[in-house]
Amino acid sequence: MADTFMLSSLRQIVQEVNTASSLQQALDLIVHRVRRAMGTEVCSVYMYDATSTDYVFAATEGLNADMVGKVSLHASEGLIGYVVSREEPLNLDEAEKHPSFKFFEGIGEESFSSFLGAPIIHQRKVLGVLTVQQREKRRFDESEEAFLVTISAQLAGVIAHAEATGDLGSLTSSKPATPQRSARFFGVPGAPGVAIGETMVMSSPADLNSVPDRPASDIDQELDYFWRSLDRVRADIHELDAALANQLRPEERALFDVYLQMLNDNAFGGEISDRIRQGSWAQGAVRSVILEHVQTFERMEDSYLRERAADVRDLGRRVLEYLQQANTERPVYPQKTVLIGEELTASMLGEVPTGQLVGLVSVRGSSNSHVAIMARALGIPTVMGAVDLPFQRLEHSQIIVDGYNGTAILNPDEELSAQYQAIITEEEQLSRQLETLRDLPSETTDGHRVPLFVNTGLVSDVARSLDRGAEGVGLYRTEVPFLLRDRFPSEEEQRLIYREQLEAFAPLPVTMRTLDIGGDKALPYFPIEEENPFLGWRGLRVTLDHPEIFLAQVRAMLKASQGLDNLRIMLPMVTHLSEIDEAQSLITRSYTELLDEGYRISRAPVGVMIEVPAAVYQARTFARKVDFLSVGSNDLTQYLLAVDRNNARVAPLYHSYHPAVLQALEQVADAANIEGKMLTICGELAGEPGAALLLMAMGYDALSMNAANIPKVKQTLRCVSRDQADEMLQRVMQLEDAEMVHGYMQAKLDKLGISQYLSPGALVSMDN
């Protein structure tokens, strides 16, 4: 089989599987397409059934289809069980001679000798086995084996979706599918906390893929919405045809006639109206019909016809856009609403009635997304980047949002719900207890002071930060005001925003980071398209290339500090001394210009962020050039471990307790101490009580964190002496892996009676 044909077949199968309307349809598509692509006589799928703990004969092409759902094997039985137990492919030229071979009557596989089976694995769990067979005695070659393994990996995500929606039950039971089985989906933490609620699916404007399944509350009204929207699309097409009449040849304009024919009653229009009459709301009917036809066109052999899939999708989007405008009914939000969707926005949060929004789960986005920043400011537990979540089919499902671990648990059982409810209750009680700490100093039992700063970005952060006892701002994310606009804010607009922050915390220090965009933080009006954005044009690299942006921002900061003198300026993503020199020169220029213009200002202290390995090794040199250093532990951990912290698939490998990270943090602390420069840290690690003790022992002068973590960290510091923290650090630096460090710190805090200040969600996730 030619590699090019396999590659094209693979792409086609992936597209079809991802748009299948049910698990059974996906399985049937796979066995049909794989058998054809590989030129084999048989392709079958065996699926794990949690009820019987067997692997069920779930789909086939080439064997006896009447036996589907009627034959099952234990995990230790036959070649299927052998593949399951070894968790790797099995390639045989004479399957019947293998010691694990077992004959099953009625399936019809007795005449097939060659066997290739690949496990279907999702998150280290074997969900099934995909097999191909032939009469001819031969071993399948490496490219065929690789092809089957790739298809199996694709099928794993589909099965995970089916577990959540209830489709999986329909394979092994005569009962209709019901989404009752608990399913866990992994993302990345967006905002800490735990929430239990009911899902509400939010769809993006004119995005067919994000439209949820929803029953029609009034079929006649949905039909009226649909036909009116169809009429408006027809009118648009006629207008477009007329506008281009003098620019296109008749044969090119014929495409508009094709569009109109597609919308006729005997084409898409009729199919969609039939779906609505069957009980679907109009938007869901449009989505299902259009995507089914897109799939049909995309699998066609003729390239011209394949290209028509884009035309069909475009028509569907046009109809959907008018439908969304026509349907002005306000949705009814559950009392405990958890918004889920492909990409949540700030405006979606604002639509939920006050007091009813308890959690967020987004398929796309990262911990630095605007919605995640807002969620942290509002104290709403959030999971971002839950890429496997089949959100369209989960309206009004029960869900747990674990914002500590970036986990969403659908349809939790009573025991798990009770465990998480206990966490929520415990956090509420703990929060009330810690309110008394606001005006107490952040110091150890032997009087060592460690100021606790806050990370902010929104105006709404201010009150929460001061209420929790913040002693200043260790990181003000200046990119947030830029994200909230559709253009660069002017110098005066920036001055007003910065003044508000500086005044709110005066005389406490406010550290303002210069614009930090790139990586996972993109401005919609200043897109940065790169193959590897985290190693690309970001942070100070961008603003030094655009000094007009840097100068306007620094001038606005300095103007805003007049009469307050509590501003500190911090430079992000520094890797070279020349960058510091260039930035310092521009800051000096801005300062001098403002003095000449009559402003009575002081030159603000300037610091750099240590967030890449190069900066760790140059920390002493950098310290000589600036007034302070600040470690950005999130990025530093990411770069040291080569793990994208916003990628849910590798999130378990991201661990700030990794010995390499701890050694780097200690090395920076030693460098700052030798040079006599203030050292702070402003990553998530600073807000973890156990880590705060280690950082204090290393010599960090101040810790900056989210406002919600300040009371827990303060209470932890007040329960320990500096000598005790030093002993913990010495022991930790001898340990060999992150799990050992985490276990040691857990045990020490348990012994000190302060383990309740750890993030409680972590305990449930590790035990389940």
Image: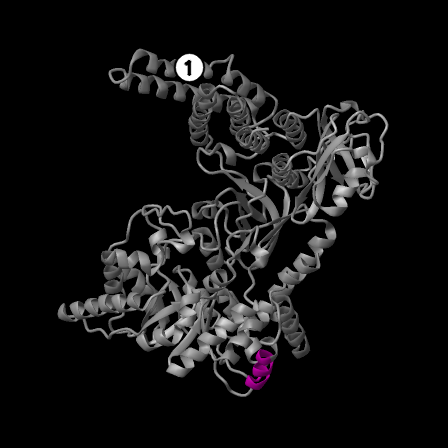
Q: Nearer the viewer, residue 533 or 634?
A: 533
Q: In this view, does 748 lie above or below 489?
A: below
Amino acid type at image mark 1:
Val
Task: Tell which of 248 and 666 is nearer to you.
Answer: 666
Question: In the shown orientation, is residue 39 left or right of residue 351?
Answer: right
Left or right placement of residue 664 versus residue 731 in this view: left
Left or right of residue 673: residue 14: right
In the figure, residue 751 lies in which quadrant? Answer: bottom right
Image position of 64 with respect to 398: above or below:
above
> Residue 314's quadrant in the figure?
top left
Colour scheme in use: one colour
Q: Across the whole image, how many numbered discs are drawn on residues?
A: 1
Percent position (x, y) of residue 140?
67, 33
Asked if residue 268 is positioned above or below residue 383 in the image, the reply reads: above
Q: Give the range drawn in magenta.
A: 721-730
Q: In which quarter of the image is residue 669?
A: bottom left
Q: Which residue is painted at 70% across and 59% down in the image?
A: 767
Q: Quadrant of the C terminus?
A: bottom right
Residue matched to label 1: 258
Residue 50 visible in the snapshot:
no
SS for dot 1:
helix
On whether residue 727 falls in the magenta region, the answer is: yes
Q: In which quarter of the image is the N terminus?
A: top right
Q: Position of residue 85 (x, y in %)?
A: 76, 46
Q: Answer left or right for 573 relative to 114.
A: left
> Residue 232 appears at what percent x and percent y?
39, 21
Q: Which residue lies furthest to the bottom in this view?
A: 446
Residue 72 part of the magenta segment: no
Confirm whether residue 695 shows in the render: yes
**Mark 1 neighbour density, 10 Å: few (under 14) some (14–19) many (20 or more):** few
